[in-house]
């Protein structure tokens, strides 16, 4: 019973960290990366789909993405979706290929992105702590129902605390890496 609760909590903590990783990928650094366009949705025959599902998205060089829609009719739709998105880039269309130059980040913009990254990391830490709280509550309920002893309760709480510390440490490391990549010029 303890192992099931611990495994569930550990899985949920890991998923929180993975979610943070995907959120960090959406925060733009000065370099071109295809995941920047993951949040951009395009109307494709009545349904909203990511750009990557209607076009090839490649990195041409360190500061340029190329987007090549699979259908000629989608070029203007994709271009409009990219321009109206909040990522702050403007595609240059040549035939059916769009080049998206990544403007260098200003110091002010970098600081905004760092602030955003810190808030994402803090939300993840809160989620991890909430998972710990839920697991500890489950352990205490088991103890109250006399399904586990006080010693087992203490061991379980120590085990879940150790897992929490590991995941919070991962979040801190990820944040430090993201801050470093954002401050690179």
Image: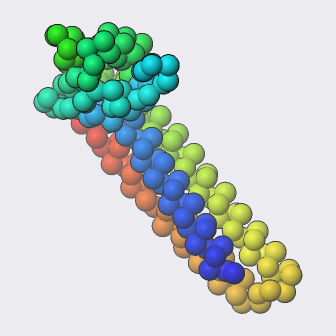
Q: Which image quarter is the N terminus in?
A: bottom right
Residue 79 screen position, x and y as percent: 32, 13
Q: Is residue 63 left or right of residue 74?
A: left
Residue 2 screen position, x and y as percent: 67, 80
Residue at the image point whose x is 72% and y is 90% from the top = 151
In-front residue for pair 142/51: 51
Specify whether residue 6 is in view: yes
Residue at the image point whose x is 42% and y is 21% from the top = 44
* Above/below status of 90 relative to 125: above
Q: Which image quarter is the C terminus in?
A: top left
* Residue 31 occupies quadrant: top left
In-front residue for pair 74/142: 74
Residue at the image point whose x is 42% and y is 13% from the top = 84
Residue 3 screen position, x and y as percent: 62, 80
Residue at the image point whose x is 53% and y is 53% from the top = 16
Q: Is residue 117 left or right of residue 183?
A: right
Specify whether residue 101 is in view: no
């Amino acid at each position: 019973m303890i192992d099931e609760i611990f495994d569930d909590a550990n899985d949920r903590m890991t998923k929180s960290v993975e979610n943070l990783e995907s959120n960090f990928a959406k925060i733009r650094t000065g370099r071109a990366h295809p995941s920047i366009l993951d949040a951009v949705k395009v109307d494709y025959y009545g349904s909203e789909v990511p750009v990557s599902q209607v076009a090839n998205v490649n990195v041409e060089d360190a500061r340029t993405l190329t987007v090549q829609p699979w259908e000629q009719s989608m070029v203007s739709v994709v271009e409009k979706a990219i321009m109206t998105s909040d990522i702050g880039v403007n595609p240059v269309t040549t035939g059916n290929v769009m080049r998206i130059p990544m403007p260098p980040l200003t110091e002010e913009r970098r600081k905004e992105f760092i602030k955003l990254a810190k808030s994402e990391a803090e939300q993840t830490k809160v989620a991890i702590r909430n998972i710990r709280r839920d697991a500890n509550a489950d352990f205490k309920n088991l103890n109250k129902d006399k399904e586990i002893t006080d010693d087992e309760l203490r061991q379980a709480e120590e085990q879940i605390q150790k897992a929490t510390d590991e995941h919070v440490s991962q979040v801190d490391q990820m944040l430090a890496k993201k801050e470093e990549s954002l401050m690179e010029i």
